[in-house]
Image (spheres, grey):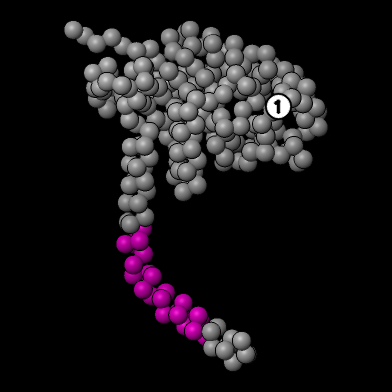
Amino acid sequence: MNKLAVVFLILVGFFGVSCSQGASKESGGENNQNQAESIVEQNRKNDSLVEVDHVHSASDIPVLTPEQKQAYIDKAKKVAKNAFDIFSGHLNRLFKEKHPAEALAYCHDNALKITDSLSRAYNVQVKRTSFRIRNSKNKPTAQEEKVMEIYREQIHKNLSPKPYMHYDVYGKPHVYIPIMVQEKCLMCHGDPNKDIPEVINRKLAELYPGDKAIFFKKGDLRGIWSITFPKKKQAN
């Protein structure tokens, strides 16, 4: 391409952008409205993909009102917050006292014990899972993988993932709550070459030889809380 052609293309691009600025300003409000409607529609689509009844017979489950459905979500969020507070309280103390290796040992020895105790206390089944797990006992089910994939799609489209509730094949209510990676998570779940201190790298190798829960970045989906409620008997 000769120099004259290049200059011509640059001028066309410049005037094209300049001429479109006025039209862009006039249509700015309309574009913002269309974007908002698009986000609402995307959320509805995501809801329809997850919030369906996975039972063999519709008669096996009660029909819930939005308020009843929200009650399940609220209780699951309370359970998840309780679990998070217990974990973070101990970990923050140990890290503050400069005992990172002990913090990892605490997670290794007590994580499942804590979720089991909360399960008994709230009469639910509490589980943490992820695509990239640290403990093999936290392997996700097919439905949990489906939910996490939808959450990742939401994040990719700059949408905020939110809790979902649905029934499983046995008619048990399930609630899924996203777990997002925060800055402080990177010390144990970030890049081993720059985020994770060597003392923690060594302890991770010792406690979790097959560890996959690394190379996360701030804002990533770390995993989900998966809360299962007992099936309620239908009234006669």
Of 123 and 52, which appears nearest the observer? 52
Q: What segment carries the magenta color?
A: 11-32
Task: Give the side of residue 65 with respect to residue 162, left or right.
Answer: left
Q: Quadrant of the N terminus?
A: bottom right
Q: Which residue carries the number 1 mark?
A: 210
> Overall secondary structure of the magenta stretch?
helix
On the image, the x and y values in percent for residue 175 come to 41, 24
On the image, the x and y values in percent for residue 197 come to 78, 33
**Which residue: 32% across, 51% down?**
37
Using the image, determine if residue 103 lies above or below residue 130. above
**Which residue: 27% across, 27% down?**
66
Q: Amino acid at mark 1?
A: Gly
**Circle 1 Cα neighbour tier, 10 Å, few/some/many (<14 / 14–19 / ≥20):** few
Of 88 and 54, which appears nearest the observer? 54
On the image, the x and y values in percent for residue 61 come to 27, 18
Which residue occupies the extreme left position in the image?
A: 236
Specify the quadrant of the image occupied by residue 25: bottom left
Which residue occupies the extreme bottom position in the image?
A: 4
Which residue occupies the extreme front position in the image?
A: 56
Specify the quadrant of the image occupied by residue 93: top right
Q: Quadrant of the C terminus?
A: top left
Using the image, determine if residue 100 lies above or below residue 25. above
Q: Is residue 216 magenta?
A: no
Task: Give the side of residue 31 with respect to residue 160, left or right.
Answer: left
**Which residue: 54% across, 14% down?**
115
Task: Give the side of residue 33 with respect to residue 109, left or right.
Answer: left
**Which residue: 80% across, 27% down?**
202
How many numbered marks are there?
1
Q: Secondary structure at mark 1?
A: loop
Whether residue 100 is visible to the viewer of this picture, yes or no, is no
Using the image, determine if residue 51 lies above or below residue 170. below
